[in-house]
Amino acid sequence: MFRKYILPIIVFVFYRTLSWTWRVRLFEPESLKKSLENKNPVVLAHWHGDELALLSVVKRYRIATIASQSKDGELMATVLKWMGAKTSRGSSTRGGVQALKGLLRLVKDGGNCSFAVDGPKGPLHKVKPGVFELSRMIHGPIYAAGVACDRAIHFPKSWNKTFLPKPFAKVTIIWSESLP
């Protein structure tokens, strides 16, 4: 009961309140702005460790993503939904084909793929080929995110070097030009 109903509320309220204090600066190439305006699908690629900072811009990019079928994935899917994202459930080890089909449906309905390119288990900062296949399947370009933050809590024991910007942090998100 706690994990399914109460914990998502706590996480959402905490995160939403914290992220409202951040000063987020976005740098987007013109081609990304045009794709968003025209509702052309894109793949927004990033590292796993940048996800907590990137959640602050979920609504702007009409995010569609995959969340695992684990208990942690359930929590993430619920919080993402409340933030305005759409999720398809599955992982590379459980329900992957269904998750991919679901993601493609979400993109067809107007979403943009958000994709952690270093895979569900790493290694850290090693791009997996799935992002290129996904780009081909949706007929959309890839834009890679660079994320920086002036003050953050770092989680050094996590494999993906996750960080959470502190209150009133300056968060900078820079999107690359489109990758073919």
Image (cartoon, rainbow, N blue to C red):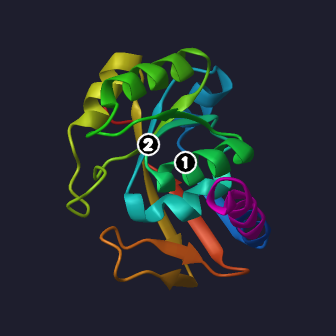
Q: Is residue 6 magenta?
A: yes
Which of the two residues, 127 or 174, is positioned nearer the viewer here?
127
Residue receiving disc 1: 74
Using the rendered view, name the quadrant where residue 11 is placed: bottom right
Q: Is residue 156 left or right of residue 175?
A: left
Q: Residue at x 34, y 18 (%)?
A: 137
Magenta segment main secondary structure: helix
Dividing the picture into quadrants, the one containing residue 1 is bottom right
54 and 29: which is toward the camera: 54
- To which residue does mark 2 refer? 69
Identify which amino acid the numbered label 1 is placed on.
Glu
Depth check: give the residue in front, 21 or 154. 154
User: Pointers 1 and 2 in contact (CB under 8 A)?
Assistant: yes
Q: Which residues are magenta?
A: 1-14
SS for callout 2: loop
Label number found at residue 63: none
- Whether residue 160 is in magenta: the answer is no
Compared to 43, does 102 lie above or below?
A: above
The location of residue 122, given as percent across then percent down, is 24, 58
- In the rendered image, residue 80, in percent from the top left (x then y), is placed at 63, 47
Give 29 or 129, whichever is nearer the viewer. 129
Identify the residue at horizontal 34%, vertical 81% (top origin).
157
Mark closer to the chain start, 1 or 2: 2
Query: Looking at the image, can residue 180 be seen?
Result: yes
Exactly how many numbered labels are in the figure? 2
- The kind of residue tagged 2 is Gln
Query: Which quadrant: the C terminus?
Result: top left
Compute the Cα span from label 1 to label 2.
7 Å
Residue 89 % position (x, y): 47, 35
Q: Quick check: can you spot residue 139?
A: no
Horizontal arrangement in the rendering, residue 49 relative to residue 165 (left or right): left
